[in-house]
Amino acid sequence: MGGLIIRSDNFSLHVPEPLFLGFLGVFALLIIGTLAAFVLPAAQPGKWADLGPRMRSWWVIALLVGGALLLGWQATAILFAFISFLALKEFVTLAPTRKEDRLIVLLAYLAVVVNYALIFADTLFEDSYQVYLVATPVYVFLVMAAAMAWIGRTDGFLATVGIVHWGVVVAVYNIGYIAFLMRVPDAEAPAGAAGLVFFLIFITQLNDVAQYCWGKAFGRTKITPKVSPNKTWEGAIGGWATTALVFYFLAPYFTPLSPLNAAIMGVVVPMAGFFGDITMSAVKRDIGVKDTSHLIPGHGGVLDRLDSLTFAAPVYFHLLAYFAIERF
C-alpha cells in the first residue's frame, strides 16, 4: 500500500498516497496564493487588498484541519465539535433572542454535546447513524418547543424556537456530517475516511476560491444583488465549471464513486455550497451584519467560512451513502 508511513515504538501513522499528494497539493496552492498576495495588490491596488489576510488564515485552517485528519476520527470529531460551538455562538449572539430565551439557548448548546456524542457512540452501536439522522432535526426541536411551553413563554414562541433551532441545524447538525464521515471504514474509500473528509473540504473551499477569483477577474452580471452583491454569474459559472471538472477527475483517488456518480456529485455538491453561501448571506442581511464575527482575518467569522459547507456537507454525505458507501 503506497503513501507515507511513520512508525515509532508507541505510534504508527499511515497516510494513503492520494491523501498525502492532496496535502502536498494544498501546500503548493497555499504557497502560490501567498506569493499572489504579495504580487497582485501591488499590481492592482485596492482590488486584491484582502488577499493577504485571507491567505494567512488559510494557512492556519489547513494546519488545524490537516492535523486533525492525520490524528484520526476522534481528533476530527473534537475539532468540529469546537467549530460547531463557535459557529452556534456566533449565530446565537447575532440572532434576535431575548434574555428570557436563555433556557432555549442553553438547550442549543447542549445539542452540540448530543450531536457529537452520537458520533462517538458509533463505536458502541451500529445504528447510531440512524439516530443521528433524527436526533437534532426532530428531537432537539421537540425538546426546545416543549421546554418553552413548560415555562409558559408564549410571546415570541414560534420566532424563538424556529430561529434557535435553525441555528442548531445549520451550525451543529449539518457540520457534524463532516465528522461523521470519519466513521466510514477506511476500506470503503481509496484514501480512507480521512480522504473523504479532505475531498469534501477541498472541493467546497475550491468552489469558494474559484468563484471568488473568476468573479474578481471577469464578474459583471450580479446574481442576487439584494442578498450578495459580490456574487456574479461569471464568477458562479466559472467556479462551478472549475470545481465540477476537478471533482470528476480527482474522485477516483478519494471516493468509491463510479464515473457517472462522480459527474453527478461534481455538479450537485458545488451548487449546494453556493446556495449555502447565499442563504447565510440572506440571514446576515436579515440581521443587519456583514460578517458573523471578526474571528478569522480576511474571512469574517466561523459561520462566514463554513457557509458553503453547511449545505454541501449533508448533500455530499447522503449522496455518497446512496451511491457507494455500504456502511450507511
Image (spheres, grey):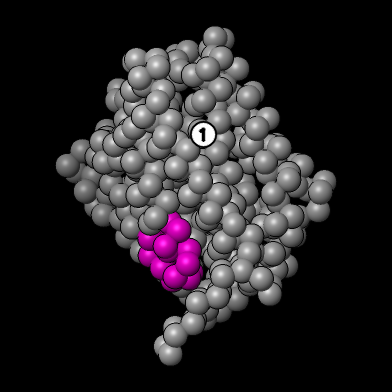
In the displayed structure, 324 sits above or below 121; it is: above
The answer to whether 2 is drawn above or below residue 65 in the figure is below
Of residues 263 and 279, the one drawn nearer to the viewer in this rendering: 263
* Residue 69 inside the magenta-drawn segment: yes
- Left or right side of 245 for 158: left
Residue 219, percent across and down? 54, 14
Disc 1 residue crowd, few under 14, some 14–19, many 20+, Cα 10 Å? many
Q: Which residues are magenta?
A: 65-80
Q: Residue at x 38, y 65 (%)?
A: 78
Q: Amino acid at mark 1?
A: Asp
Which residue is disc 1 drawn over? Answer: 208
Q: Residue at coordinates 41% horizontally, 23% vertically from top-left?
A: 40
Q: Secondary structure at mark 1?
A: helix
Residue most toward the bottom?
9
Total marks shown come to 1
Hey, which quadrant is residue 125 in on the image?
A: bottom right
Locate residue 33, reporting x and y percent: 45, 36
For the point 66% across and 71% down, the residue is 2
Tell whether 288 sits left or right of 228.
left
Residue at point 56%, 10% (across, down): 221
Left or right, 194 with respect to 261, comes to left
Q: Residue 222's x, y, as percent?
A: 53, 12
Residue 139 is one of the magenta-drawn residues:
no
- Residue 52 in sight from this viewpoint: yes
Quadrant of image for the C terminus: bottom right
Q: Position of residue 24 (x, y in %)?
A: 53, 54
